[in-house]
Image: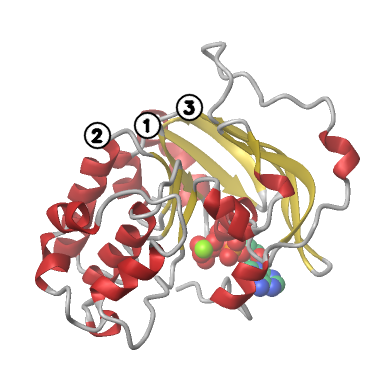
Amino acid sequence: MNSNDQNGNNDTAELLGGAPFKEKGQATGFEPQKSKGGQTAFFSVWDLHAYYDESYIVQGVSFDIREGEIVALLGRNGAGKTSTLRAIARVDSPEVRHGEIWLDHKPLHDMSSHEAARNGLGLVPEDRRIIQGLTVEENLQLAQIAPPIGWSIERVYDLFPRLGERRKQEGTTLSGGEQQMLAVARALVRDIKLLLLDEPYEGLAPVIVQEIEKTLQQIKKLGMTTIIVEQNAVAALHLADRALILDMGQIVFDGTAQDVLDNEELRHEYLAI
Ligand SMILES: Nc1ncnc2c1ncn2[C@@H]1O[C@H](COP(=O)(O)OP(=O)(O)OP(=O)(O)O)[C@@H](O)[C@H]1O
Ligand SMILES: [Mg+2]
């Protein structure tokens, strides 16, 4: 269980945006890192440091992601996975005090969470945040309230027929698996460039995990660049092209998903699988 990452945060706080950078001068002269293929990375995190007050959690994280790549961000409980996603999404905490975040040539590190969302960031938080009192369809409509708009609601229902069947049902009365589908759908109806999934399989029965996995495979085929954080590392590695392993707020491994599946020592040391 991991309930320590949503302390004191809510949608209102997110809309108010993250804390401003303290070291803006750093930004000048930095170019998004070059990926191995010599292309400018589609998404790039460079030397990211983030804090909850004096608690230093994200300790110099750097990585690149190519467009269309699915990256599994793994590590033990408390390694800093959720904090890294939250820092990238520019939500109110943790506070980013150093580093740069680039998405499709746009500097997310200079943006509030609201601006980052408008520039293509789609965070699906672990608690799913289905809005109480609204139907499935109203939850989707609310996500589309500000442009740029992504998928149509009908297209969402094609991908998630269960949501179509339950369009008039109150969102919070859906099953856990259906709520996860709705949370992902809410990201897709906005025009996103990077999907951040925090433990999409958490608390779900294996058969539902398989169902969500199939949908994520379909989304992958459409070329959606994605970072998936999952305790179910094996499931995440089967979906992902690449894996990053975090330990105590630092990246200790960056390689292919297959490398992790093949490396028993690495799995044992950092993932307990
Ligand atoms: N709001 C917060 N205030 C203070 N410390 C926090 C807060 N949220 C998380 N932390 C601390 O930051 C560290 C990293 O937590 P984080 O939630 O990012 O880890 P995680 O890798 O997502 O873990 P899990 O697998 O349990 O979800 C932990 O030591 C945690 O206690
Ligand atoms: Mg977490």
In the rendering, which numbered label is found on residue 241? 1
C-alpha gap between disc 2 and disc 1: 12 Å
First reached walking from the N terminus: tag 2 or tag 1: 2
User: Is 16 or 74 nearer to us in this picture?
Assistant: 16
The residue indicated by pointer 3 is 66
C-alpha gap between disc 1 and disc 3: 11 Å
Q: Residue at x 27, y 79 (%)?
A: 171
Tell me if residue 113 comes above or below residue 139 in the rendering.
Answer: above
The residue indicated by pointer 2 is 221
Q: Position of residue 59 (x, y in %)?
A: 74, 49
Does residue 78 appear anywhere in the picture?
no
User: Is 227 or 272 nearer to us in this picture?
Assistant: 227
User: Is 272 or 187 nearer to us in this picture?
Assistant: 187
First reached walking from the N terminus: tag 1 or tag 3: 3
Residue type, label 3: Arg
Which quadrant of the figure has residue 180? bottom left
